[in-house]
Amino acid sequence: MERATLGNGLRVLFAPDRSAPVVAVAVYYDVGIRSEPEGRTGFAHLFEHLMFQGSASLQKMEHVTYVQSSGGTLNGSTRLDYTNYYEALPSHALERALFLEADRMRAPRVTEENLANQIAVVKEEIRVNVLNEPYGGFPWLTLPPVLFDTFPNAHNGYGGFEDLESATVQDAQDFFDRYYAPGNAVLAVGGDLDPAEALRLVERHFGDIPARDVPPRPDFDEPVPRAERRAEQVDLLAPAPAVALGWRVPDPADLPAYLPYVLLTSALTTGDASRLRRRLVHADRLVTDIGSHVGLLEDPFDVRNPTLLVLEAHHAADVATDRVVGAVDEELDRLAIEGLHAGELERVRARLGSALVQGQDHVMGRTLSMTALEQQRGDPALVGELPALLATVDAEAVRLAASTLRPDSRARVDLVTGAP
């Protein structure tokens, strides 16, 4: 892995891998859901859509056409702490991908027509994925406002219709000027490449983009709750009730304190031999499904502080939600007292390590992971070190992590069916 920084502040990573004639290009901007100002919920996601609507030299959707006509794929996403754009293409098309990303970093085509069109698209996406979908937004939209107090951490990242509809072209231009500066981004290129030649191409296409001031990154931290917080979500479309529990976990930058929680979720709910699946699904038959993960959007390694451990369970209507939560608490207490059984830790370590290695096997997955780690931690080499770091977490650390998941510091959202 090699690194460079252009004169305009753009950080660049190169990760050569000559095993296949494929390259991946990713650009991560240090702006996400938590960066949205009050009154502009959903704006980071809306702007992601606008970045596909043409740029300095290209008309609407031409970016997509050029990538796909080269035999490539592309996408983008908005997360809590970044917005990213990425392509995977045959390696001979590397310069094309770099030109395309530089062109929209230089100047997206923000017009009244494009803005109105994408507001409509985002509203329809919300209708399809949240308003008209059973369990829509549960729990990623409904748990944060219960656990957190501050607007950056608690607000609806998909956005409210009123906020979206009131957005203006000037709002979009101001957002671009503030957050889409080269110095607020990381560009990564992985795969079949020569780093020296790739740097020459990067400098050709990105080097003349003017530098702009980079906004200071806010501190989004807030106090840990000192009592259980509860809310109820009525879902007229859901066929059965559900419950979500959320606990704050240590800062992801503190890996020795953070990694035990990643192993803990696997021990609790991954696979039929896991603690809660064995007890609640197979033995007591209290739930139809149960799962847990660290990170609201389910990736523990692409998020800053504060973040949380989420546990979600779905159960039949004739099973009381309190009974489900009580069984979860009993198993957490047992784990906090007894710790992991012989061989349990080894099984969990092997599963997680294997999943990490498999996730990095494809050039696109590896490139995305290293870009996120550079953007958030300044350490892209972690992409290859995390399996070994997880293997150093011992049973006592997992036991202590379980002991912190107490009722008096969690958020709980009960999803109920039927009319209120």
Image (tube, grey):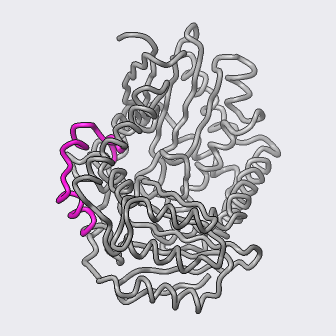
Residue 273: percent from left, percent from top: 78, 35
**Going by the image, does 340 lie left or right of 116?**
right
Residue 369 seen in the figure: no
- Residue at the image point whose x is 46% and y is 65% from the top: 63
The residue lying at 44 percent from left, 80 percent from top is 11
Q: Mainly helix, strand or loop, the magenta region?
A: helix
Res. 374 in view = yes
Q: Give the range drawn in magenta.
A: 153-177
User: In the depicted view, which residue is nearer to us: 327 or 419?
Assistant: 419
Image position, residue 248 (x, y; %): 45, 45
In the image, is residue 37 part of the stretch drawn in magenta?
no
* Rendering coords of residue 182 (x, y %): 36, 77
**Depth order, front residue of 99/337:** 99
In the foreground, 4 or 225: 4
Residue 154: say if magenta: yes
Q: Decide if residue 181 is on the left or right side of residue 341.
A: left
